[in-house]
Amino acid sequence: MTAASSHARHLAEASRLANEIRLSVEQVSYAHSANPGQAPLFTLEATSFQARPGEIVAILGPNASGKSTLLRLISGALAPLSGRILLDGFVTHSLTPRTRAQRIAVVQQESTLLFPARAWEFVLQGRHSHGRSLRFESEDDVLIAKNALAQVGAADLSDRWMDQISGGEKQRIILARALAQQPLLLLLDEPTLHLDIAAQVGLLDALRRLAAENRYTVVVVTHELNLAAEYADQIVLMQRGRCLRVGPPSSIYQRELLEQVFQTPLSVELGSSGRPRVTVLSGTQ
Amino acid sequence: MRPLTLRRLLLQCLILIVILFFVVIVALKFGAVPVSLYALGRDLLRVIFGQSSQISTDYGLIILNIRLPRILLGIIVGASLSVAGTSFQALLRNPLADPFVLGVSSGASLGAILALIAEPHLALSPVFSALLTPLGAFLGAAATIAAVYFLGRHEGQIDSTTLLLGGVITGSFLSAIIMFLMSTLTGSLRGITFWLMGDLSTPLQKSVYWFLGIGFFVAAGAIYTTASDLNLLLAGEKEAMHLGVDVPRVRLVVYIAASFLTGLAVSVSGVVGYVGLIVPHIMRFIFGSDHRTLLPTAAIGGAIAVVVADTLARTVVAPTEVPVGAVTAVIGAPLFIYLLRKRLT
Amino acid sequence: MKGFSRPLLRSAVFVAVAASLSCAGLTPAQSAPAISSASPAFREVTDETGRAVRVPQPVNRIVSLAPSLTETVYALGLQDRLVGDTVYCDYPADAQKKTKVGDTINPSLEQIAVLHPDLVLVTKGLNHLETVQSLENLGISSYATDPHSVNEISSSTRKLADILGAPEAGASVAREMERHLADLQKRLAASPSKRVLFVVWHQPLISVGKHTFIADALRLAGAISIVDSEQDWPHVSLEEIARLQPDFLVFAASHSESVPSTVEALAILPSWGMLEAVNNRRYAVISDAVNRPAPRIISAIEDLARQLHPDAFAEKPESGKGKMEKEITPRNQASFAQSFFLLAGLRKDSANCGGRVCAR
């Protein structure tokens, strides 16, 4: 292990013990400019929030509200127009792709492999950012990959070909690859989109468990009101590129606010789990 | 779960090298002139022990001066084309990519043709004029690499789709120029047809062989340092970036190195087709898609393929010779169809 | 560097061993006078392309890489010294029995080397510089001819004979050629030249340029090629030919039987039908000797002269055409192909390969 990564680990330990802020998004904005001569089109206006280890943050909003842009900024794929994003004190965008991948893991919705691979090969790819760039995987790497598969409950799928796995099981393997990166931050963009209900619940349960056990910070982009309410510790409510409110579900799930954002009549109640539950009222007022 | 280890990789390469060794021995034995294995062995030993002056037989000189340089060239060309093909398949995320898809071969051919046209008008020493065609081809290749690079950029980085489009269009454009020149200048360009079909009989000096060898190892080595990155790149570009791959840098290194290898091969041997397309697929079929194994095994496999093809080209209708590119096409196309069908079942 | 250089290192070792073998092997050839028979005497000459050639003396073993040169060697009576020729060398019949070293474009270096030639004969219009360079690397000298007129064929033959050590034979063959030509000129002096189109190939239409020996041969046969081109094998447009309206078409064919049917096929086409010569079936067929810059070209010239100007030869009743046919063998088909083989090959290649020159 290099000096830099062990240093990062110490910081992570320290922040966990002191319950300090791990992820800090500070006044971050982004603009898309198709034409150099034209005025920039703001897809995201100045947004801020913070997250701690073990927390699940949901970025919630309707389509085209800037959620994905915000996630991509956090992942370091885009550079913010203004503001900055700090992860344990490091500005994410200024890190090299390799060091970034040691800290931040993005869980894709789908995987597009050009040539066939087995599940364990796929998960092992998560170890790429650790160690030297050209090398063979060590015993440790293999162990971590096995562990990751076990953590998502997919240890028995390890020898299957990726193109023979589908749906919820595939999503778990993809998650396992992200876990193999041993990140501090897990990012997911609409992970429940292609999953059936059982798979959706399974995934989010797993995320909650993993965040608690391994002290990950999880940021999920979603438009599913009830899933967000049920699983998120903190919600960032977005509409048309603006962040309207940041807070726990109880402060976000106000009927007037949600109706304004989602442009549809609905009712908010308290669910049996103690979290808010939203019911969409159809058609008539 | 059996991840790749260094030992397994070396074992696989060793097996292939042994096969290559036997192929070379067979290639040395067979040709328009029959040579006995005993004479072959005896002369090779004499050379190794520095007694080359004692090789008085014609056969010894035939083997060393005609066949061995040609086999050596075949090894370098085969290895270069296979590594380039593997790299382009990864870079362009396209299993149909081959070393010539980005127009480098058309550029090299045009360079060679221009050299042939210019040659009578330049007063050159015999040594230099012998090198003019390979040199022209190499310069043509280099110019094409640069042109396609600039065409293939999108927002300052190489983009796979744009690169493919730019390369194919450039290749077509250059081919059109070549056709124009060939139809209007039929007198001076008679020599080009054979070369365009792949020809390992170009006479070259020792220094050129050294240049080829060093060039191959430098470029192939550069590509090999990105082998793990290529594995990830094939899972998707965004995924690769999020897994820690510096995608723009990897693309640039692989593009330049693989195009350089192609230019190297084409400038000394013309267009030898199918090797860069099929050998990577065969090696993938046998050894899997991990580029840490794929690149070296493809290199050795390509060397084997070209040496075998060249031996057939020399012996099938002896004493006439068939162009190497024709042999690789005749064997390669049905083989590709077979692989395709196997993959679909 | 653990996972990096070991497999490449092994390959490097192997290639290095092979390279050192070849380098060691390359050295003796470059230092020694190499494969030719041990004869210390040399003669420095300049061949017809301006290259300096060291010709071993005497020249006992010759390899010819062009059919015209093979014919010339036979014409000079030196066929016993000819140890190898190409697969296209078919005239005279005895030439087919010689050891074959391959074709003219890419002959087998091994075959040539094992024959121990003192001198290899090449011609610029047919053979490649690469072959000459490869032979030089092996220490084998090559002499190149490059005749562009019938006179040059004659002087080329003289020079070649001189180099091969048989100057009297060369002089006599050249004199015979010149005498024959002078005789022809006398006969044709009174007849105006016919305007002809020499058809190398009809689809696409390829003729000969004005700097070729074929054009010169036509002239000596009392014909003028209407194609005025700087290129040796120009593709000409049928429109231009129709505007010029040649008096005759001239075909050079080994199998003269196929020509009438070819012409019949062309006559049906509206484009070719524009030519009066095609409509009136005014064409001449001569042997493919006209394609070879060798002494036998004179017989083709005379043959053509007889067909174009029959009245100038009134005292000789039998047509020269019949004489030519005796010499035609099925193998000659190949030499017809050979003359424009590369041209046809060029056209076929570019036609078949679509967007790329000679695809994968």
Image: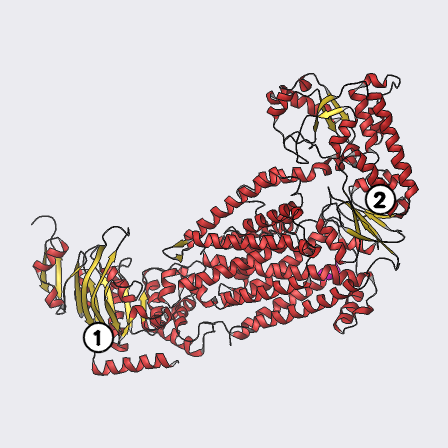
- Residue kind at label 1, given as amino acid type: Arg
Q: Which residue is drawn at 87% across and 18% down?
A: C317
Disc 1 + disc 2, Cβ < 8 Å = no
Q: Name the residue under label 1.
A: A52
Relative to A52, say whether B307 is above or below.
above
Query: How far across and down, in percent of the image, does residue A90 sit?
Result: 28, 74
Give the residue pinned by disc 2. Answer: C160
Q: In this view, does B40 lie above or below C348?
A: below
Between C320 and A126, the one lying in front of the other is C320
| Secondary structure mainly formed by the magenta segment | helix
| Residue B25 counted in the magenta span | no
Residue drawn at x 85%, y 19% is C313
User: Is C212 left or right of B269, judged from the image as shown?
Assistant: right
Q: Magenta residues? A: B26-30
Colour setup of the view: secondary structure
Alpha carbon separation for disc pair 1 and 2 = 96 Å
Disc 2, SS: helix
Give the image location of residue C25, x and y in percent.
Answer: 75, 66
